């Protein structure tokens, strides 16, 4: 089982439009409301691939209760940490014939150190399940979150003996890059920003990732590169993978799908290269559908067969 933690959970409302006209009344062609946030997307994909997931998230108010209803409808189980306030709403305006979606992220609830202590207890309680192999901390931190409190929860997860993935950015990412034993998944822009250096070439990304593993004691570093694929490094080497071109509907949740594929690959004891291939194929399949973490498994299998991995020097 993979425990998926979403500190800044949301109700994701995806609206498909033929055209987006500012300052005009428009009619949606299709709309989808789901329990959302990066960790929930990871859980959704883990289950699509045949695995088992448990969600943890901060929730609040009537919107939080609706979130639970939506999650339950999808058979997404959870151990929720309730706080004062209202769970946020995020809106994705998709125009498939014009490229990617326009995303408007709602403001999250204010979460303090005491709430993070309750979240730590909930995550550790979930991790006591003997089938739990991994914990994934996914997404931004809610307003008011002390970065030290977040890092302490990550350390507690690592100490529990579960592989601990972190997919975040900014100050939270910089803090986790110094936590020995953490496995980190980021996109290229987040990685470059955290390190303060531009990273363009695959070989450079692989070398920097290996250096972090050697010097800071990280377990795995995975860096997504959009349509170029991804790089993954461990103590034993670094690899790059790229998927075939596919029709773009929306890239929302594709990084989460990639993390789900990699984490599930490690849970199944695949080699790092094969786990990377699984992750890249899942991320690529995700762009073909509306809504994060939603794709046809047949598309995933086809893309997986055409996804190639190379070892980096």
Image (cartoon, rainbow, N blue to C red):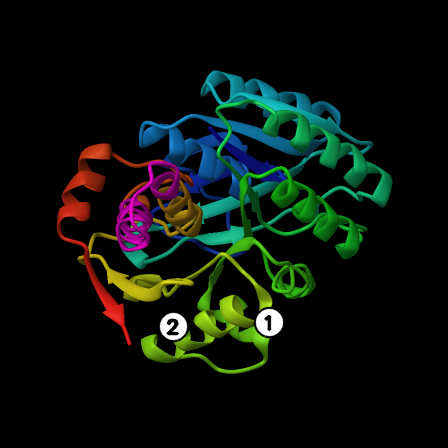
Specify the segment rendered in magenta: 264-285
**Front-most of residues 291 and 241:** 241
In the image, taking residue 65 as reference, residue 165 lies left or right, namely: left
Near mark 2 (Cα within 10 A), the count class, few <14, some 14-19 or many ≥20, is many
Q: Is residue 25 above or below residue 188?
A: above
Near mark 1 (Cα within 10 A), the count class, few <14, some 14-19 or many ≥20, is some
In the image, taking residue 120 as reference, residue 205 lies left or right, namely: left
List the residue tagged with mark 1.
194
**Residue displayed at 22% across by 57% down:** 243
User: Where residue 288 sits in the image (x, y, percent)?
Assistant: 27, 45
Indicate the quadrant where residue 157 lies.
top right
Q: CA distance from mark 2 to mark 1?
A: 16 Å
Of the 4 image quadrants, the one containing the C terminus is bottom left
Q: Is residue 122 above or below residue 105?
A: above
Q: Is residue 8 visible?
A: no
In the image, taking residue 309 as reference, residue 25 lies left or right, namely: right
What kind of element bears circle 1?
helix
Q: Earlier in the sequence, mark 2 or mark 1?
A: 1
Residue 305 marker: none
Question: Within the magenta stretch, is there residue 267?
Answer: yes
**Front-most of residues 273 and 28:** 273
**Front-most of residues 102 and 224:** 224
Q: Is residue 72 above or below residue 285?
A: above
**Residue displayed at 46% across by 38% down:** 41
Q: Is residue 283 visible?
A: yes
Q: What secondary structure characterizes most of the magenta part?
A: helix
Q: Single out the mark in the foreground, 2 or 1.
A: 2
What kind of element bears circle 2?
helix
List the residue tagged with mark 2.
206
User: Where residue 65 sits in the image (x, y, percent)?
Assistant: 67, 21
């Amino acid at each position: 089982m993979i425990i998926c933690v979403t500190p800044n959970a949301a109700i994701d409302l995806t609206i498909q439009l033929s055209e987006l006209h500012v300052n005009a009344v428009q009619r949606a062609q299709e709309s989808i409301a789901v329990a959302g946030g990066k960790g929930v997307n990871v859980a959704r994909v883990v289950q699509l691939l045949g695995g088992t997931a448990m969600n943890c998230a901060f929730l609040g108010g009537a919107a939080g209760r609706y979130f639970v209803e939506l999650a339950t409808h999808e058979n997404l189980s959870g151990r929720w940490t309730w706080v004062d306030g209202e769970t946020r709403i995020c809106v994705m305006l998709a125009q498939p014939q014009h490229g990617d979606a326009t995303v408007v992220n709602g403001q999250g609830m204010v979460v303090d150190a005491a709430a993070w202590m309750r979240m730590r207890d909930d995550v550790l309680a979930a991790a006591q399940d003997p089938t739990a192999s991994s914990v994934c901390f996914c997404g931004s931190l809610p307003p008011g979150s002390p970065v030290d409190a977040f890092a302490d929860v990550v350390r507690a997860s690592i100490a529990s003996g579960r592989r601990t993935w972190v997919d975040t950015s900014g100050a939270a990412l910089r803090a986790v890059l110094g936590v020995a034993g953490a496995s980190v998944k980021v996109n290229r822009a987040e990685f470059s920003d955290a390190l303060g250096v531009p990273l363009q070439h695959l070989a450079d990304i692989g070398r920097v990732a290996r250096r972090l593993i050697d010097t800071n004691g990280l377990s795995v570093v995975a860096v997504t590169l959009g349509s170029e694929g991804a790089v993954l490094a461990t103590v034993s080497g670094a690899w790059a993978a790229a998927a075939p071109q596919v029709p773009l509907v929306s890239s929302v949740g594709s990084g989460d799908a990639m993390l789900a594929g990699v984490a599930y690959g490690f849970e199944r004891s695949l080699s790092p290269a094969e786990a990377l291939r699984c992750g890249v194929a899942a991320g690529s399949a995700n762009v073909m559908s509306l809504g994060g973490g939603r794709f046809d498994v047949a598309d995933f299998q086809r893309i997986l067969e055409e996804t190639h991995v190379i070892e980096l020097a």
